[in-house]
């Protein structure tokens, strides 16, 4: 297929692009700065302009069979008023612009859009959450609900089979949450955050990318799909496993008030968490390469 990818130079993007190419697909990246993006990606990739705000040129999706949508303002930042607006608009408005272009192109026959497990909201404690669980009602949950509604317009208005992949905490030492955790843990200054009882729904980067490709190849897999490993763990258990993988102690408890002072409203993501299970991915036959945390951390850090 010819696959268009947004967010191709982000955390998930380069490896996904390489995986698509290795499976024989053509890749067209949709990005603000095409020349800069193509410098960072393998040879043979083409590009077209997509800024998430203005209507795309008709030729941007010419001949495109499928679209994978990864782009969005980073959530892991202090949620000022301006930051919250950027987080909302990059996902909701950006997805609207993309779906409008897909409808106009008339060739797209598969759409895979990312979302986030923030859909379920915080303070769900140990409740097991699947794709059938109700959404939360905090800022991030409301963003995810609106984001997914725009993505699902592709199916509702153009008949394009659409999967919405709700990403958990993606693990890799080169980026994301794990990258930020490593320095204190390597110094022996890591440990549980807040109560330590909140769940961490994680996924190895390789499995996250593989699940996106699996969703792309299985148009019958429609609607929400949780991208989380089958065994979420508590924050305390995660800290212990990370310390063990690094051969360092993990007993330096970080009080909730320090996290709130540092992150403001965004601290809810860290302090509350969710226990999210990949029910639909497993039912569809997706096989996780790294279903258990200790094995994932050993592979990533060993």
Image (cartoon, grey):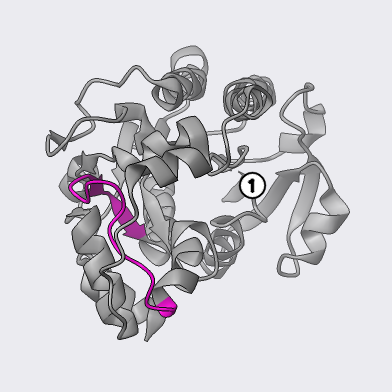
Front residue (pair 54, 244):
244
Front residue (pair 182, 208):
182
Up-down relation of residue 178 to residue 158 (above or below): below
| Residue 274 covered by magenta stretch | no
Specify the farthest residue to the top: 157
| Residue 191 covered by magenta stretch | yes
Please tell me whether mark 1 sits on a helix, a strand or a loop.
loop
Picture residue at 22% right of the left edge, 42% below the top = 276
* Mark 1 lies on residue: 7
Horizontal arrangement in the rendering, residue 145 relative to residue 72 (left or right): left
Residue 284 rendering spot, x and y as whole percentages? 21, 46
Could you classify mark 1 by the number of other residues whose Cα lies within 10 Å: few (under 14), some (14-19), or many (20 or more)?
Answer: many
Q: Quadrant of residue 118?
A: top left
Up-down relation of residue 97 to residue 293 (above or below): above
Horizontal arrangement in the rendering, residue 165 relative to residue 95 (left or right): left
Picture residue at 54% right of the left edge, 69% below the top = 174
Q: Quadrant of residue 198?
A: top left
Specify the farthest residue to the right: 35
The magenta segment is 186-203
Residue 203 rendering spot, x and y as whole percentages? 33, 57
Front residue (pair 248, 28):
248
Residue 165 rendering spot, x and y as whole percentages? 39, 40
Q: Quadrant of residue 254?
A: bottom left
Residue 27 rendering spot, x and y as whole percentages? 66, 54
Horizontal arrangement in the rendering, residue 162 relative to residue 282 (left or right): right
């Amino acid at each position: 297929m010819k696959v268009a990818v947004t967010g191709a130079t982000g955390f998930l993007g380069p490896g996904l692009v390489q995986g698509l190419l290795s499976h024989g697909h053509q890749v067209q990246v949709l990005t603000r700065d095409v020349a800069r993006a193509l410098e960072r990606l393998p040879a043979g990739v083409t590009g077209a302009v997509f800024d998430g705000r203005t209507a795309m040129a008709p030729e941007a999706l010419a001949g495109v069979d499928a679209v994978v949508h990864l782009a969005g303002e980073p959530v892991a930042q202090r949620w000022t008023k301006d930051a919250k607006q950027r987080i909302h608009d990059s996902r909701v408005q950006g997805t609207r612009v993309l779906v409008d272009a897909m409808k106009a192109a008339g060739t797209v026959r598969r759409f895979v859009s990312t979302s986030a497990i923030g859909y379920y909201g915080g303070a769900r404690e140990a409740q097991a959450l699947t794709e059938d669980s109700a959404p939360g009602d905090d800022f991030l949950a409301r963003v995810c609900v609106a984001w997914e509604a725009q993505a699902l317009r592709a199916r509702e208005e153009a008949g394009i089979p659409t999967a919405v992949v709700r990403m958990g905490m993606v693990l890799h030492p080169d980026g994301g949450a794990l990258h930020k955790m490593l320095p204190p843990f390597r110094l022996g200054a890591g440990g549980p955050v807040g109560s330590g009882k909140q769940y961490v729904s994680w996924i190895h980067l390789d499995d996250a990318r593989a699940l996106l490709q699996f969703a792309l190849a299985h148009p019958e897999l429609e609607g929400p799909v949780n991208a989380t490993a089958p065994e979420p763990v508590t924050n305390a258990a995660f800290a212990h496993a990370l310390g063990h993988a690094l051969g360092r102690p993990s007993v330096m408890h970080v009080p909730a008030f320090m996290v709130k002072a540092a992150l403001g409203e965004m601290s809810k993501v860290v302090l509350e968490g969710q226990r999210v299970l990949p029910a639909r991915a497993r039912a569809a036959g997706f096989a996780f390469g790294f279903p258990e945390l200790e094995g994932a951390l050993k592979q990533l850090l060993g």
